[in-house]
Image: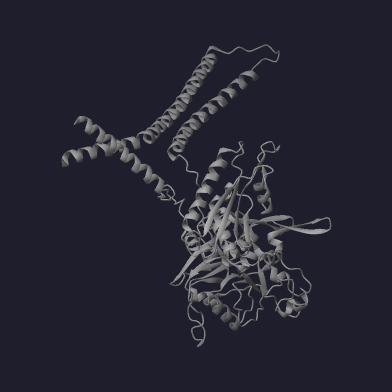
């Protein structure tokens, strides 16, 4: 009987083991995860999920990574693991339309040759090239369309989801985005619609930004007097709409309501427009139109650019030539840094330096159905100044301070600014997107680039992130709806806050002791110097009095005691950190076994109770 019970128990154990093996084989291909990170670092945005769910053609993501290189630094390996994990998440969400392939491009291999064909270039791991080549890029392929990220930098990790989603959107669509460009300035290198500019600007070169846009998109010029925006234009870039007519405003209104995307750059005092003015027309009393706004249109959405006012921020003030060899800081000529740029938005999160000469100030609360995202802004102690004060640089004392937005993105349901028009749309049929920027000069070559002559050729390179801002926003508008509002991921580096806090506390104690010691050293040095000066002119050495010897001896004792206290502080720091480390390690090692044991005990008690 006992033998039978033993056999039955052994058979039960084997059966249970077999069930576990079979269960593991079935469940292993499945991806079941719970993201418990504070910032949901491993969760795809809703826009990405939408794009993957709507895929109707096969897309292949080819991940090229030199994982066999034994000189790869550990942080690079960890970053590659996170990229690989994110790619698998994309694959699992695609419904089978997206496949991830990983390649290790070893030297002189077919994988390396294909990586180079796709535009991926190996990077040396050290300055001498002894560490071999590192390939770390991703290629998206769908039919005959290709897109690539040639090299993944760890600094781009917060934008990684955006880069991948944009690349998939690019190859999954057969259509190339069409961009319309409308401006009262000669941005296309031809004469503008304004009569007083035609003679002055004849034969001018296109702005560098426009040339770059033409390289990336299909571009169609749109006249400032247009009464209809062509249906095949996906995104309209509007630059300095000075003297815009009601008919053209209505055309813009209907363009937005039918689903077109608008990016508008207006300005309360456009320096470029005033510099491009025809001197002959100015002599006739016709002053250039330096200001522009879309208030008649945007007021229907709850937003206006305050007339005659400019944004100012003392922390972003630029140093300008005030004449007579003098330089003056002007808080209305803004040199923006990271605190004034939205770091959480994927379109602006990588930007760090921008220049906005005399930018306007937006104000108002968006109407129902719209959502506002501020992209560029002053700090919380910003203010507004009049255009006349900005010209002189004498801004005076502000009456009030607040964060002043200078660029924003509006998304949602737009309503018409022309409700009295009998025909035409009254409300957008689907969510739309409009980007408003209160400065035009930021796009001009003078304020965004620096040029050089290289072997007779004019070379232009950006001097700040102005172009990057415009191109990033345009890229977002021209892409899939999924790209709008994709969040920028926070850092995957999770510091040990408690350990850092302990180090700060100890450092504070150490610094206080060190300052006290240095003070005493200075006091003693001064005392010794005075003793040296008391030496006789005959060069004979002057001996210290017993009181002075006692003073030096006492100080040396204090130095010794202070050094002992510093050692004690360091010892306490190490002790607290080591205790914290032991607790964390013990929790990691014992938590799971204790949980299993507790479950086993509870189950045993339950079985015993039910019998």
Q: Position of residue 571 (x, y in %)?
A: 45, 26
Q: Residue at x 39, y 45 (%)?
A: 24
Q: Position of residue 240 (x, y in %)?
A: 64, 72
Q: Quadrant of residue 167?
A: bottom right
* Residue 330 visible to the viewer: no
Give whichever of 603, 192 is nearer the camera: 603
Give whichever of 154, 609 is nearer the camera: 609
Give whichever of 13, 236 is nearer the camera: 13
Q: Position of residue 398 (x, y in %)?
A: 53, 61
Give whichever of 484, 578 is nearer the camera: 484
Relative to 251, does residue 49 appear above or below in the rendering?
Answer: above
Colour basis: one colour
* Residue 527 visible to the viewer: yes
Q: Residue at x 74, y 74 (%)?
A: 190
Position of the C terminus by quadrant:
top left
Position of the N terminus by quadrant:
top left
Q: Residue at x 55, y 28 (%)?
A: 518
Q: Quadrant of residue 274?
A: bottom right
> Extreme right residue here?
456
Q: Position of residue 475 (x, y in %)?
A: 60, 63
Relative to 230, does residue 139 appear above or below in the rendering?
Answer: above
């Amino acid at each position: 009987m006992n033998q039978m019970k033993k056999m039955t128990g052994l058979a039960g154990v084997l059966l249970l083991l077999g069930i576990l093996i079979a269960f593991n084989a079935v469940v292993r291909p499945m991806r079941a995860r719970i993201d418990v990170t504070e910032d949901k670092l491993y969760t795809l945005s809703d826009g990405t999920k939408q794009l993957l769910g709507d895929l109707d053609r096969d897309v292949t993501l080819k991940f090229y990574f030199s994982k066999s290189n034994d000189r790869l630094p550990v942080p690079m390996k960890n970053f590659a693991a996170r990229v690989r994990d994110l790619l698998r998440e994309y694959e699992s969400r695609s419904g089978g339309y997206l496949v991830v392939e990983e390649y290790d491009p070893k030297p002189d291999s077919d994988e390396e040759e294909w990586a180079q064909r796709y535009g991926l270039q190996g990077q040396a791991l050290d300055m001498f090239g002894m560490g071999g080549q590192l390939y770390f890029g991703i290629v998206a392929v769908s039919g005959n369309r290709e897109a690539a990220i040639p090299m993944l930098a760890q600094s781009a990790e917060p934008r990684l989801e955006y880069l991948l989603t944009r690349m998939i959107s690019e190859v999954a669509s057969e259509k190339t985005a069409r961009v319309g460009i409308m401006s009262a300035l000669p941005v296309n290198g031809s004469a503008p619609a304004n009569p007083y500019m035609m003679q002055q600007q004849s034969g001018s070169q296109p702005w560098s930004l426009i040339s770059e846009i033409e390289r990336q998109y299909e571009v169609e010029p749109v006249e400032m007097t247009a009464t209809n925006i062509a249906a095949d234009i996906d995104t309209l870039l509007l630059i300095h709409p000075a003297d815009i007519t009601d008919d053209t405003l209505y055309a813009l209104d209907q363009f937005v309501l039918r689903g077109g995307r608008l990016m508008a750059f207006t300005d309360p005092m456009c320096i470029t427009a005033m510099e491009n003015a025809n001197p002959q027309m100015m002599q006739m009393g016709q002053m250039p139109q330096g200001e522009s706004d879309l208030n008649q249109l945007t007021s229907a959405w709850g937003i206006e650019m305050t007339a005659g006012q400019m944004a100012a921020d003392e922390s972003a003030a630029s140093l300008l030539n005030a004449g007579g060899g003098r330089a003056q800081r002007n808080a209305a000529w803004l040199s923006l840094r990271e605190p004034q740029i939205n770091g959480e938005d994927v379109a602006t999160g990588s930007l760090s330096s921008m220049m906005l000469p005399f930018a306007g100030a937006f104000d108002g609360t968006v109407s129902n159905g719209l959502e506002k995202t501020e992209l560029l802004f002053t700090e919380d102690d910003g203010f507004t100044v009049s255009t006349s004060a900005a010209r002189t640089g004498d801004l005076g004392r502000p009456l009030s301070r607040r964060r002043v937005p200078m660029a924003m993105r509006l998304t949602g349901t737009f309503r018409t600014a022309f409700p009295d028009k009998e025909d035409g749309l009254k409300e957008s049929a689907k969510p739309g997107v409009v980007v408003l920027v209160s400065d035009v000069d930021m796009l001009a070559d003078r304020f965004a680039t620096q040029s050089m002559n290289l072997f007779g050729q004019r070379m232009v390179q950006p001097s700040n992130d102005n172009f990057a801002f415009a191109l990033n926003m345009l890229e977002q508008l021209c892409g899939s709806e999924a790209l709008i509002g994709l969040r920028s991921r926070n850092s995957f580096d999770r510091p040990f806050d408690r350990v850092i806090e302990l180090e700060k506390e100890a450092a504070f104690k150490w610094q206080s002791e060190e300052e006290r010691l240095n003070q005493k050293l200075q006091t003693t040095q001064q005392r010794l110097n005075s003793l040296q000066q008391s030496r006789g002119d005959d060069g004979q050495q002057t001996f210290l009095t017993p009181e002075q010897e006692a003073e030096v001896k006492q100080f040396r004792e204090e130095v010794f005691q202070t050094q002992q206290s510093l050692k004690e502080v360091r010892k306490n720091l190490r002790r607290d950190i080591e205790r914290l480390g032991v607790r964390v390690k013990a929790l990691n090692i014992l938590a799971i076994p204790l949980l299993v044991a507790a479950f086993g005990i509870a189950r045993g008690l339950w079985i015993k109770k039910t019998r």
